[in-house]
Amino acid sequence: TTNRTFTMIKPDAVEGGHTGAIIRMIEEAGFRIVAIRKTQLTPERAGQFYAVHRERPFYNDLRAYMSSGAIIPMILEKDNAVADFRKLIGATNPAQAEEGTIRKLYARSMEANAVHGSDSDENAEIESNFFFAGTEQY
Ligand code: CMP
């Protein structure tokens, strides 16, 4: 059944000029863009978004990195959206990402890994609301 996932293009990929290439890959894989913005997080808001990781050793670095430049959050729609999008982006660690995945092509490191993808339908909704509550979605 058709459902939704949430993604954001992260600061390294926006700064590197890969926004267009990444969006093209997403659309060619059959995802429809329901909502899209360009914005920048404060360290506080980045920490809120990744609150689930607050006990992890990489949390402070992640907050700093995710607030270091512009990001492009999007809501995407497709059959089996969450699982299919995670296949399209590849493993968190780009060294382990499969050939042809977005992270294999564009990630710089485990942290600066080009894109985020929600890990469940429930988190997709929470993360979508974090950026798009009360805004137009088509
Ligand atoms: P993302 O899928 O957005 O979810 C958590 C983010 O933390 C991850 O991508 C990376 O950007 C970052 N990160 C940094 N180090 C690690 C790590 N060791 N394990 C998982 N995520 C990490």
Image (cartoon, rainbow, N blue to C red):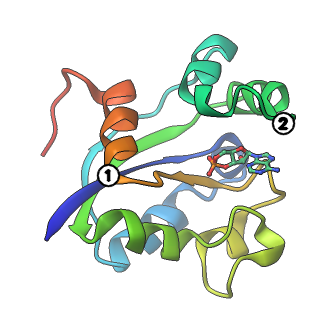
Name, please, the residue furthest toward the bottom: 99
Left or right of 82: which side holds 14? right
Residue 52 position within the rendered picture, expressed as x and y whole percent measured from the top left: 60, 32
Q: Which kind of residue does numbered mark 2 sit on?
A: Phe
Residue closest to the eye, 79 or 119: 119
Query: Where, quadrant-wise, is the N terminus in this rendering?
Result: bottom left
Q: Is residue 44 above or below residue 52?
A: above
Q: Residues within 10 Å of mark 1 (few under 14, many from 20)?
A: some
Residue 17 position within the rendered picture, expressed as x and y whole percent measured from the top left: 65, 54
Left or right of 67: which side holds 1? left
**Which residue in the protein does label 2 denote?**
58
Q: Is residue 97 above or below residue 120?
A: below
Q: Please report the residue visible at 77 percent of the width from the left and 49 percent of the height from the top.
A: 112
Q: Is residue 93 above or below residue 41?
A: below
Q: How many marks?
A: 2
Left or right of 54: which side holds 51? left
First of labels 2, 1 by sequence position: 2
Residue 74 position within the rendered picture, expressed as x and y whole percent measured from the top left: 37, 45
Q: Which kind of residue does numbered mark 1 sit on?
A: Asp
The image quadrant of residue 108 is: bottom right
Say which mark, if any, is on residue 121: 1
Q: Please report the residue visible at 66 percent of the width from the left and 55 percent of the height from the top.
A: 114
Q: Secondary structure at mark 1?
A: helix
Ligand 1 closer than 8 Å to label 1 CB = no
Ligand 1 closer than 8 Å to label 2 CB = yes
Left or right of 105: which side holds 134? left
Residue 43 position within the rendered picture, expressed as x and y whole percent measured from the top left: 69, 16
Q: Is residue 46 above or below residue 76?
A: above
Q: Please report the residue visible at 65 percent of the width from the left and 21 percent of the height from the top.
A: 47
Q: Please report the residue visible at 46 percent of the width from the left and 73 percent of the height from the top.
A: 25
Q: Secondary structure at mark 2?
A: loop
Q: CA distance from mark 2 to mark 1?
A: 25 Å
